[in-house]
Image: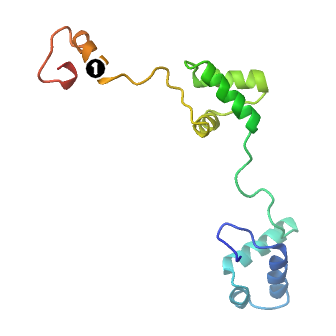
Amino acid sequence: MGWRSGQSYSQDWRDRVLAAVDGGMPVREAAVLFKVSVAYIHKARIRRRLTGDARINPNRGRPPRKLSPVQELALAAHIRWQPGITLAQAQAWLLAEHGIGLSTDAMWHAVRRLGLSFKKSPARSRAGAAGRSGARCGGQPSRSSPACA
């Protein structure tokens, strides 16, 4: 399996590229020889000069999820048990019960991952909406507005 976009080069590969450049090989020749970009070599050299280290950055990628699978199941059970719960109430419950404070965005992602939503009532049927249209239009149906038909 070869290198894929988004993956780090191995430490051995990094060391060989930098050793070749440090040994006097021009950057462009090293880039062609090792099949890396010129920019990669420059960035690796700058990083080594600034930090004294050219190793793979351990902080790459997305941060891990804050909720464990057990906590996600507890959140799902709580939302199912209280179908009218709001997002803010679910966040407060999670903080009080599990000591985990999630941002609004993280909470939405967790709820979506669980296949749930915060809808307070089921979608109204077309017949139910038509029965209420007279009250909304002052009791008089109107031909100009489809909502009041």
Answer with the quarter of the image where residue 21 lies. Answer: bottom right
Give the residue type that dot 1 points to.
Answer: Ala
Answer with the quarter of the image where residue 99 lies. Answer: top right
- Count of numbered circles on the image: 1
Is the N terminus in the top left, top right, bottom left or bottom right quadrant? Answer: bottom right
Residue nearest the viewer, comparing 128 with 51: 128
Dot 1 falls on a residue whose secondary structure is: helix
Q: Is residue 118 left or right of residue 122?
A: right
139 versus 46 height, above or below:
above
Answer with the quarter of the image where residue 10 lies. Answer: bottom right
In the rendering, at what x and y percent does residue 93 appear?
70, 21
Q: Is residue 13 left or right of residue 132?
A: right
Q: Is residue 121 left or right of residue 86?
A: left
Residue, disc 1: 127
In the rendering, at what x and y percent does residue 117 appear?
54, 30
In the rendering, at what x and y percent does residue 8 appear?
74, 69
